[in-house]
Amino acid sequence: MRFSSNVKPYVLLLIVGIFLLLGYVYFSFFSERLNRDILIDEDQKRTNLSQLVFKSRVRNLVSPEKLLYKQPSVLVGRTDVVSVTPWLAPIVWEGTYDPVLIDNIYKPMKLTIATTVFAVGKYVRFLQDFLETAEKHFMVGFNVHYYVFTDRPDDVPSVNLTQGRHLSVIQVPVSNRWQEISARRMEIIQTTIERQIRREADYIFCLDVDSKFHARWGSESLGRLVAVIHPGYYEQTRDHFPYERRPASTAYIPMDEGDYYYGGAMFGGFVEDVYTLTKVCRKRFEEDAGNSIEAAWQEESHLNRYLLYNKPSKVLSPEYLWQDFKAQTKEVKVIRFSGVIKNYAEVRPNV
Ligand code: UD2
């Protein structure tokens, strides 16, 4: 098509301008989508971690002199399970570590382990068993600071805590949707780390309250970024994982990606690393909410997306997250922490 000579030059300039603008909009939209995970770095920059002081720090693994323990073998060990990820992070199973040796390495460090647990609405009823069994099995011999988040502070049971263990109750609002209560944990953990935990603890574990400890959960679980393999999916192929599958969600994971399906009932690590995790997941949850999308399994979906591209440095086997309704399998030699059977319709504010 030829422009007739009576088309003014400024009209031509206007047309060229419109095309340039459309090109810019198209390019920025797609580059934003392609670079979505680079946003993590942006988040880290905006978080201004350099201005936040954290107690967490890397220490050498010093073993006491003359400590006697079983000689480790490079030939004999567990062969029925995989105990290392393809990025060389340990997967912790019974028989892959020496509890005497590992405790003797970590105990002299005088670490404080923050443990967050939410008991909102009727979930406050699970606190007593959670705390009593934690006192028997969870990080025994370490300083543990429980942070109990609840809307019912008066109903928090008084449980005898052994020396070096403390409990703080922090009041949080209730919601009429369990999905909201579960997912908002990321935001509340983030802001509590910012406000106090970063100065008070070396490591943090964030746990579901409707659970009990049944056996040792100790220093073998400590790491920079720690996740647990969900007991319901460890025998499945990745296309069966209940990841968020809608590309419109920021928790989206395509069918041909994914390492393991991690449980939302536990994540942990250095306070600094968990801070970034909660900040990113919270931001993405809110971004989705702004687009009227809620990921399939709320914060668990965002956690899985985060961990796919920010690999955990230690992975706990399903020994560390079982479910009471599930029969024990032969590879799980010890059930350490397990979700109790609950009547969902009765304990949740909505169905
Ligand atoms: C799964 C996950 C859970 C979470 C959820 C996502 C496992 C074993 N569990 O459990 O961690 O990712 O899916 O939606 O991986 N809560 C309250 N009051 C409420 C509801 C929830 O305090 O009314 C807290 C409480 O600490 C509870 C946690 O949120 O343990 C998770 O809620 P859930 O146990 O009802 O979720 P569930 O069983 O679907």
Image (cartoon, helix red, strand yellow):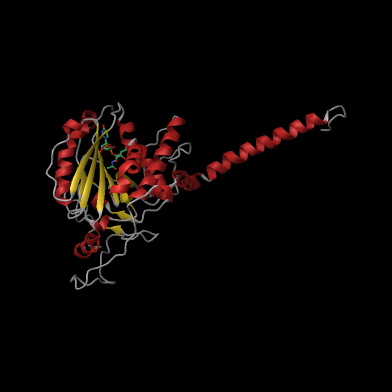
- How far across and down, in percent of the image, does residue 189 sit? 32, 40
| Residue found 17% across the figure and 55% down from its top | 141
The quadrant of the rendering that contains the C terminus is top left
| Residue found 27% across the figure and 67% down from its top | 62
| Picture quadrant of ligand 1 | top left
Give the side of residue 166 with respect to residue 350, left or right.
left
Give the side of residue 105 with respect to residue 6, left or right.
left
| Residue found 18% across the figure and 38% down from its top | 127
| Residue at far left of view | 160
Q: Quadrant of residue 11?
A: top right
Does residue 272 lie above or below 72 as drawn?
above
Does residue 110 lie above or below 7 as drawn?
below
- How far across and down, in percent of the image, does residue 71 sit? 22, 72
- How far across and down, in percent of the image, does residue 245 sit? 43, 40
- How far across and down, in percent of the image, does residue 81 sit? 28, 59
Count of numbered marks: 0
Does residue 244 lie above or below 177 as drawn?
below
Residue 230, visible in the rendered structure: no
| Residue at far right of view | 5
Give the side of residue 79 with respect to residue 41, left or right.
left
| Residue found 42% across the figure and 51% down from its top | 310
Pick whichever, 68 or 76, lies toward us. Answer: 68
The quadrant of the rendering that contains the N terminus is top right
Residue 107, visible in the rendered structure: yes
